[in-house]
Structure formats: structure tokens, C-alpha cells
Image: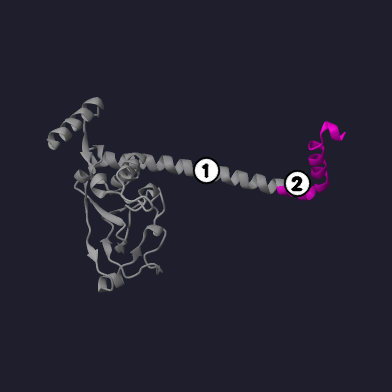
Amino acid sequence: MRVSIESRSTKNMSSTRTIPPGWRWVQFRDICDQDREIIEPGSDLAKTRPYLSLEHIESNSGRILREPNEASEDEGQSTTFAFDSRHVLYGKLRPYLNKVALPDFEGRCTTELIPLLPKHNISRRFLAWLLRRPATVEAAMREKTGSRMPRANMDHVLSVKIVIPNSLDLQEQIVNAFEANIASVLAARKATQEQIHFLDLYTRSLLRLFPNKFASATLTEGTTDNDR
């Protein structure tokens, strides 16, 4: 009975939202696999692979905040997962932080990061982009476990339905366009911050050059009719 309900739901979704030719509805589990290869603490492999924790990944951007050859104080002696440049690392702890990374080296990570392997004809960058979308973050938070330190239910995350293009080239084009837009926004933000900084410096310079004039102007503006 559950299968028929899910099938009917998928049909309704497909019929109410038209998708272009060459696109299809899938679940995340259709386009990636969890790859939980354990590295035991204290093992030779643990000694040779750099460690990543959630703190080493920037929210939203996914930027990795440490170099592979840097020592980390929080490596500890806990069990970790192996990863390499084929994986997407998905942060399941506090999914609202939106920590999804694309490592370019071999390492090991906290078990709060789940290494995901894209399936055939799925762009790794496109998979990461799909996982970072606000809709995916909201879906992960809906079925979280725990209140103080919520964790994403990976079965639920992998069951989230998405629409994707079959073409690997088109997947890459989508990510390229998105990243170009983000770069433009960041450049505009940086330019605005620089203008604010220069305006602040200019104002400080005027105050130093003409302290009496600006002090007088301030006093005049603050004078009321009752004071006159």
C-alpha cells in the first residue's frame, strides 16, 4: 500500500510541475551513494590522512578552511570516514549550517560528515549544489533528530525528490552559471564594503582637520528652540 501511495505522489508531482525534455524526477539516493568506509583511530591509515571536522568547512560556500598538511588539534582518537576527491562531504550535524564540501585530497573526516559518491553521469559539483539549496536544507531540518544538536536523518535526505537534467554538460553549465552569479554578488558586496570603509576614513580625516567646525555644527544641530 505504501508503494502505491508513493507512486501516486510521484505521478501527481510530475503532472503538476511540467519539466522540459531531457530532465527527470529522482531522489537523492538515485544519484549518489553513502560511502562510509571506516578508518579506525590509531591505525596507520589514520596517521597518514589529514583530518576534517565540521569546523574546517565554511557554511554555505563549502570552502575547506584548512590545508591538508596542517596539523589539527581536534583530530582525537575517534572513528572517522575515509574520503578523497571523488566524494561530496555532507554535514549532517546541525544541517541548517549547510556544510557541503568538495575535497581535492585524500583524508578522513568526523562521522558527522557523510561522504557521498555521485553515481554514473552525475556531476559532483552539481550534486553539491543540489545539497546546498535552501529547499534541501529545509527538508533536512523537517526530519531532524535531536533538538539541541539536531542531526539530519540521512534516509530522509536521500529520499528528497529533485528534478535534474540527464546531460552531464548541462549539469556543469547550471553550476557554472550559479557560481558566476554568486561571484558577482560577492564582488558587489566587497565593493560596497570598501566604499563604506573609505567613507569612514574620509569622515575621520575631516574631523581631524576641522575639529572645531564639526563640533560647532553638531552643537548647532542639537540646539532646540527652548535653548535659544
Q: Position of residue 38 (x, y in %)?
A: 23, 64
Colour mode of the rendering: one colour
Q: Quadrant of residue 26?
A: top left
The residue at the point 29 percent across, 60 percent down is: 111
Outermost residue to the right: 228
> Mark 1 or mark 2, which has the lower sequence index?
1
Q: Position of residue 127 (x, y in %)?
A: 28, 46
SS category of the residue bearing label 1? helix
Would residue 64 be seen by someone viewing this image from the given angle? no
SS category of the residue bearing label 2? helix
Q: Main secondary structure of the magenta part?
A: helix
Q: Nearer the viewer, residue 188 or 58?
A: 58
**Magenta-highlighted residues:** 204-228
Dot 1: within a 10 Å radius of its alpha carbon, few (fewer than 14), some, or many (20 or more) residues? few
The residue at the point 57 percent across, 42 percent down is: 192
Q: Quadrant of residue 191?
A: top right
User: Which residue is denoted by mark 2 in the rendering?
Assistant: 206
User: Which residue is denoted by mark 1 in the rendering?
Assistant: 189
Reply above or below: 97 against 72.
above
At label 1, the amino acid type is Arg
Q: Nearer the viewer, residue 115 or 4?
A: 4
At label 2, the amino acid type is Leu
Q: Quadrant of residue 159?
A: top left
Q: Position of residue 130 (x, y in %)?
A: 31, 43
Q: Position of residue 73 (x, y in %)?
A: 41, 69
The residue at the point 32 percent across, 39 percent down is: 174
The residue at the point 79 percent across, 36 percent down is: 221
Dot 2: within a 10 Å radius of its alpha carbon, few (fewer than 14), some, or many (20 or more) residues? few
Q: Quadrant of the C terminus?
A: top right
**Residue at mark 1 to residue at mark 2: CA–CA distance:** 26 Å
